Amino acid sequence: MPIHVQCDECFQSYKVKEERAGQTLKCKSCGSRMQVPAADEETEDLFEHYGEPITPQRKTKTAVKSKKKKSRKKGPSLSMGKLVKKAFGVMSMALGIVMLGASIYMFFEGDSPEGKRSRPVGGLIMASIFMGVGKKWLFDE
């Protein structure tokens, strides 16, 4: 009478000959090792009283298919919101460039009549803010 063996990894059931009792076998499904129990009457009685065990579906190795996304190059689709955002980005960049130019001019030529040097730090900071915001609005999607 064959011995019933079940793999602990993939739960695949096998029937092996009594001569294989006590040996270690390799599962054909997942490749893990399993021990064939000794054939004794207690095991056979369990099968007679309870019937065949219900085994879960066998795990199959699925071939990994490489899914390449077809990139469809779309033309420039600008909605009204994107168009307004791009327009404000251009205006913000232009204002930043003007402020940067004015700050540089004030740094070199903007001396006061009392002889004090002007320090246009605020103008440089505002120019960098406007240019950064303009860049974000123009180039980020």
Image (spheres, rainbow, N blue to C red):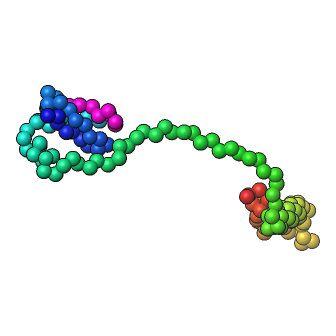
- Give, as a single range, the part of the protein colored magenta: 24-31
- Is 37 displayed left or right of 104 in the figure? left
Q: Residue 134, position in %: x, y?
A: 79, 62
**Does 136 appear above or below 5?**
below
Foreground pick, 35 / 106 = 35
Rendered residue at 29%/44% (across/down): 11
Rendered residue at 83%/64% (across/down): 83
Q: Quadrant of residue 66?
A: top right
Q: Does 45 appear in magenta?
A: no
Foreground pick, 137 / 1 = 1
Q: Residue 55, position in %: x, y?
A: 28, 47
Secondary structure mainly formed by the magenta segment: loop
- Is 136 displayed left or right of 34 in the figure? right
Q: Residue 132, position in %: x, y?
A: 76, 61
View extreme (top): residue: 19
The quadrant of the rendering that contains the N terminus is top left
The total of numbered circles placed on residues is 0
**Does 53 appear above or below 37?**
below
Q: Residue 99, position in %: x, y?
A: 86, 65
Q: Quadrant of residue 105?
A: bottom right
Q: Is residue 9 visible?
A: no
Rendered residue at 29%/34% (across/down): 27
Q: Does 26 appear in magenta?
A: yes
- Is 41 displayed left or right of 131 in the figure? left
Q: Quadrant of residue 125?
A: bottom right
The quadrant of the rendering that contains the C terminus is bottom right
Rendered residue at 31%/43% (across/down): 10
Q: Is residue 42 visible?
A: yes
